[in-house]
Every structure is written in structure tokens, then in C-alpha cells.
Image (spheres, helix red, strand yellow):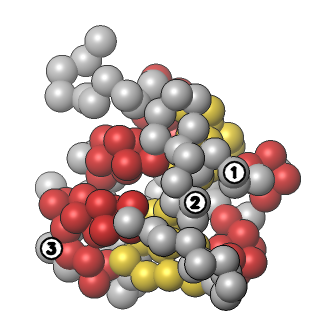
Amino acid sequence: MLKGIPQILSPELLKILAEMGHSDRLVIADGNFPAASVGRNAKIIRCDGHGVKELLDAILQLMPLDSYVKQPVTLMEVMPGDGVETPIWQDYKELVARYDERGAQAVGTIARFSFYEEARQAYAIITTSEMALYANVMLQKGVVTE
């Protein structure tokens, strides 16, 4: 065990976070996300039994967000006609604001199929047991300056 490292972050996930470079992307996927097919070229880390929010919080404690893009945090938009509520997005915005001075302004959305296309370029995809719908979040890594 290590001091100061959130316990939810496995050695495998810590290794992935350390390997990632500036502008690399990481997807934290809900339980319905097609990680195996979308992530054919990505490293896939299973975090069964955990939700997106707790992983997002732990990761943001260690990984800076890209300061060279306006919105380094991307959410999947709800498909027209789905009528799904996404209260989890507010939780994400609050977490991002805790770790990034841009606050909720650092969070953007893109259409579902565009999200999948972007996720195909991700360095890694973390699969979770998150049951909230449209709970996927993509992070773009920034530079450590300290």
C-alpha cells in the first residue's frame, strides 16, 4: 500500500495513469458501455463493483486535465427521444470543479456516436458497474507542472 493514493485505484490503473501522456484520453465507462468493441485498440481496465463518480474523484486527485483545450472532460449526450434524466452529470461537474479551476466550464458534451468515435482513440477505457444511464465520461490528460 502507498500513502496518499486513493485505495480504489488498483496497481494496474495507476500504471495506466502514469503511462498516459499529455492529450491522451481516458474513458470511465458505465456498465452499458461497449468497451470491448469500442476499445479494441485501448487498454481496458475492469473496475467491477465500482461506480463512475468514485473513480472520477480518485483519478482527478492524481491526473491533471488538459489546460490547452476548452473542455477536457466530455460527456455523452442523451439521444433525442430517450427522455433520460442525467443527475449524475451535476456530480461530475462538482468533482471537476474541485480539481480544476475552470469548474463546470471544463465539461462538455458530444453526441453518442461521436463519443464512441472519440473513445476509439482513447489510451484506456475503465469499465465500471455504474447503473446510471449516459454516465460515461472521457478525460483528456494535461501536463504536471509542479
> In the image, what residue occupies the spot 36% across and 87% down?
70
Quadrant in the picture for residue 80: bottom right
Which of label 3 and label 2 is nearer to you? Answer: 2
Residue 45's disc number: none
Front-lying residue, 21 or 62: 62
Instruction: Answer with left or right where residue 88 lies relative to residue 132.
Output: left
Q: Are marks 3 and 1 in contact (CB under 8 Å)?
A: no
Type of the residue with mark 1: Asn
Mark 2 lies on residue:
133
Q: Is residue 73 above or below residue 61?
A: below
Cα distance between the residues tagged 3 and 2: 27 Å
Q: Residues within 10 Å of mark 3 (few under 14, many from 20)?
A: few
Q: Secondary structure at mark 2?
A: loop
The quadrant of the image that shows the C terminus is bottom left
Q: Residues within 10 Å of mark 1 (few under 14, many from 20)?
A: some
Mark nearer the N terminus (2 vs 1): 1
Cα distance between the residues tagged 2 and 1: 8 Å
Q: Is residue 70 above or below residue 143?
A: below
Instruction: Answer with left or right where residue 87 lies relative to residue 126.
Output: left
Type of the residue with mark 2: Leu
Q: Secondary structure at mark 1?
A: loop
Mark 1 lies on residue:
32
Mark 3 lies on residue:
101
Instruction: Answer with left or right where residue 57 lies relative to residue 84.
Output: left
